[in-house]
C-alpha cells in the first residue's frame, strides 16, 4: 500500500469511474436537450443551485472531517501500541534477573506476533505463515487471537512472578502495560466495527445528484460547451471528495490511505529484537511504503 507521495490521482478516478461515466452522459444529454426550443425556456435563478451547492459543501466538510478524525485516531492508537510494546520489553528486561534470556525472548516473540496478528485481524486477512506457525506451535485456538495472546502474557507473568522473585509493584507495572495494550486493541476494534451512518451517505448522494440535475437550468444557455463542462466537473468534484472521505473512514481496510499496521509492526519487531540483543534483526524497508502481508 502506498503513502501520500506515491498515491496516483488515477486511484481515485478508478474508485468513482462509474459515477464519472453517468455524470458525463448526463452533462452531454442535458447539453443536447438544451438545443430544443421548448427546453431552452426552462430557467432557474442561479441562487437556487448555488444554495444547494453550499449545503452539499457543508455536508461534505463534516463527512471529511469525521473520516479524518477516525483515521487519525487509528494512527494515534497504533503509536501508543509502539510505545507500550517498547515499554513492556524494557520492564521485562529490567525486572527479570540476568540469565533469564529464555523468559525475555518468550515475551519478545509473543509481543511481536501479537502486533502482526492484530494488524491482520483488523484487516480481516488470513494470518500470515509466521503468525499461524506460532499459533500452531503453542496450540492457541481462539476467535480473537490477539486477545488470546495477551492472555498468554498475563498467564505467564502470573506463573513466573513468584518463582523469579518479582515484587507486587513490578508485577503491577507489567500488568498495567498489558492492560494498556488491551485498551488499544479494543479501540482499534471499535474503529473497525463502527460504520459511518448509512443514512448520511444516502442524503449526501441524493443532494449531489439533485444539484447536478438543477445546475444546468441556472447556467447561460448561450455557451453550450461551457454548460456541459460545468455540469460535469462540479458534481464530479463533489463525488470525488465524498469518495475520499469514504476511503479514509475505515483506517484498517488495507487500502492506500489506511493505517500502516504492517510497517508499524515491523518497527516494533526491529525495536524489540535490538533491545533483547537478538542478532536476527530484519532490515527496515522503505518508509515511503505501507506493506501488505
Image (cartoon, rainbow, N blue to C red):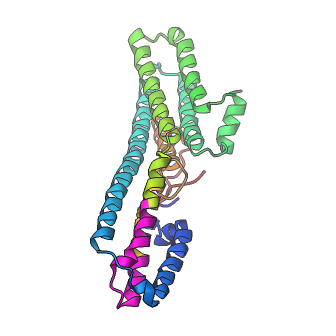
Q: Residue at x 41, y 48 (%)?
A: 71
- Give the residues in magenta: 207-232
Q: Is residue 264 above or below residue 186?
A: below
Name the main secondary structure of what is drawn in magenta: helix
Q: Is residue 222 shown in magenta?
A: yes
| Image position, residue 140 (x, y; %) | 68, 27
Q: Is residue 251 visible?
A: no
Residue 70's image quarter?
A: top left
Q: Nearer the viewer, residue 139 or 239?
A: 239
Is 99 situated left or right of 76 in this image?
right
| Image position, residue 13 (x, y; %) | 50, 70
Q: Is residue 102 above or below residue 227?
A: above
Residue 219's image quarter?
A: bottom left
Q: Nearer the viewer, residue 260 or 243?
A: 243
Q: Residue at x 70, y 37 (%)?
A: 133
Q: Residue at x 41, y 82 (%)?
A: 229
Amino acid at each position: 500500500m502506498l503513502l501520500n507521495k506515491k498515491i496516483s490521482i488515477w486511484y481515485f478516478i478508478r474508485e468513482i469511474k462509474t459515477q464519472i461515466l453517468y455524470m458525463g452522459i448526463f452533462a452531454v444529454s442535458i447539453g443536447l436537450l438544451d438545443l430544443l426550443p421548448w427546453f431552452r425556456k426552462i430557467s432557474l435563478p442561479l441562487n437556487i443551485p448555488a444554495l444547494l451547492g453550499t449545503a452539499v459543501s457543508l455536508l461534505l466538510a463534516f463527512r471529511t472531517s469525521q473520516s479524518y478524525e477516525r483515521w487519525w485516531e487509528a494512527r494515534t492508537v497504533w503509536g501508543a501500541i509502539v510505545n507500550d510494546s517498547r515499554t513492556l520489553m524494557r520492564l521485562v528486561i529490567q525486572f527479570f534477573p540476568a540469565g533469564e534470556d529464555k523468559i525475555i525472548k518468550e515475551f519478545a516473540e509473543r509481543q511481536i506476533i501479537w502486533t502482526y496478528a492484530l494488524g491482520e485481524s483488523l484487516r480481516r486477512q488470513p494470518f500470515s505463515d509466521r503468525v499461524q506457525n506460532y499459533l500452531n506451535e503453542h496450540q492457541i485456538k481462539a476467535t480473537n487471537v490477539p486477545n488470546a495472546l495477551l492472555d498468554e502474557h498475563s498467564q505467564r507473568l502470573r506463573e513466573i512472578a513468584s518463582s523469579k522473585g518479582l515484587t507486587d509493584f513490578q508485577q503491577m507495572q507489567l500488568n498495567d502495560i498489558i492492560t494498556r495494550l488491551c485498551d488499544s486493541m479494543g479501540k482499534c476494534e471499535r474503529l473497525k466495527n463502527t460504520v459511518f451512518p448509512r443514512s448520511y451517505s444516502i442524503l449526501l448522494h441524493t443532494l449531489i445528484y439533485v444539484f447536478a440535475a438543477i445546475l444546468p437550468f441556472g447556467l447561460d444557455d448561450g455557451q453550450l460547451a461551457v454548460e456541459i463542462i460545468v455540469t460535469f466537473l462540479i458534481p464530479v468534484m463533489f463525488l470525488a471528495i465524498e469518495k475520499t472521505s469514504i476511503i479514509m473512514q475505515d483506517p484498517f481496510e488495507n487500502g492506500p490511505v489506511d493505517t500502516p499496521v504492517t510497517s508499524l509492526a515491523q518497527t516494533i519487531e526491529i525495536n524489540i529484537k535490538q533491545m533483547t540483543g537478538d542478532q536476527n534483526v530484519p532490515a527496515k524497508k522503505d518508509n515511503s511504503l505501507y506493506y501488505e502481508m
